[in-house]
Amino acid sequence: MTASDTPKTAPDNREQADEDTQAQTVAGEAMTHSQAPNLSGEDSEHGGTPNPAQIIPDDTQDVVDHMEQMERSGQIDMDAYRGERSDDDEPGMLGEDGMEPGDLDEHGHARRDADDAI
C-alpha cells in the first residue's frame, strides 16, 4: 500500500470537540467546585454608591437572602398570601376565621360576625 492508497480522514470539526460540555465533565467540575461559581448568598454584593436612576437599590434583600433568612429562622414568610382566602382540605379546621360570609360550618351554622354579637 502506498501513501496515495491510505484512506484520508476528515479534519477534526471544532463543533464536535465538545468534551467540556459532556455531562460527566460538567458534573465532575461541579463536584470539585473547580469552575462552578459560588452560589452561596454570603458572597452576594450589597451596598455601594446609591444610583438615583436605579429602580431597586443594591442593599435591598434579594430572593437568595430572603430564602436563607427563612431557612435560618425556620419560619416561612406567608406575607404574599395575607388577606387571601385559605381553601383547606379539612372544613372547619380554621374555625370561624376560615369561613367566608354565607358559609356554613359542619353543624350548619353561619359565621357569627362581630356585628351580630350582642
Image: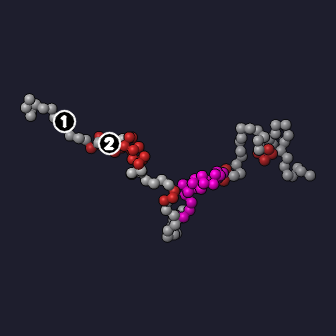
Is 71 drawn above or below residue 108 in the view shown?
A: below
| Amino acid at pointer 1 | Thr
Magenta region: 58-78
In the rendered structure, the answer to whether residue 103 lies left or right of residue 1 reads right
Q: Is residue 75 visible?
A: yes
Q: Is residue 80 visible?
A: no
Q: Residue furthest top?
A: 1
Residue sitting at 9 percent across and 34 percent down? 3
Residue sitting at 81 percent across and 42 percent down? 102
* Residue holding disc 2: 19
Identify the disc placed on residue 9: 1
SS for dot 2: helix
Residue 19, given in percent of the width and then of the height, sits at 32, 42
Label 1 near label 2: C-beta < 8 Å?
no
Residue nearest the observer in this picture, 4 or 54: 4
Q: Nearer the viewer, mark 2 or mark 1?
A: 2
